[in-house]
Amino acid sequence: VLERHRVEVEYEPLYSRVGTGLTIYSPLASGLLTGKYSGMSIPPGSRLSIPKYQYIKEEKFGAMAHQIPQADALRPLAARLGCSLAQLAIAWTLVNPHVSSCILGATSVE
């Protein structure tokens, strides 16, 4: 939902001419679309607080930092629809007619 150009424009010929679909991974953008990193804060125990995931932290709070306010801007829409930000992001992925499957993951069982 945060990086749509490639999926909606560049890959369009694959859908219309070849008939392929996408397997989407990380539809929650490594947790950004859960709202937990709102305001550029990193809660203890979250994925970006774990040392082995520092490369993701550097990406999300560095070159991709513009995505955090974009995610925050989706909160009113989620509230209006009566769902969480994470539910909105996953639903957006699953109703996309070009998505064949969606891979979700979690940092921990909890």
Image: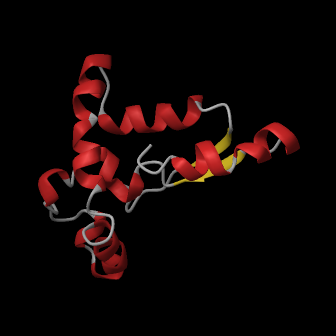
Residue in the foreground of this view, choosing between 99 and 10: 10
- Residue 100, picture quadrant: top right
Direction from residue 11 to residue 60 in the image, left or right: left
Does the image show residue 55?
Answer: yes
Q: Is residue 76 above or below residue 51?
A: above
Quadrant occupied by the N terminus: top left
Direction from residue 44 to residue 28 in the image, left or right: right
Residue at 41% of width from left, 48% of height from top?
A: 2
Residue at 25% of width from left, 62% of height from top?
A: 46
Residue at 87% of width from left, 44% of height from top?
A: 18
Q: Position of residue 29 (x, y in %)?
A: 40, 55
Direction from residue 97 to residue 90 in the image, left or right: left
Residue at 58% of width from left, 52% of height from top?
A: 6
Q: Position of residue 5 (x, y in %)?
A: 53, 48
Q: Is residue 27 above or below residue 108?
A: above
Q: Position of residue 11 (x, y in %)?
A: 69, 49
Q: Is residue 38 above or below residue 99?
A: below
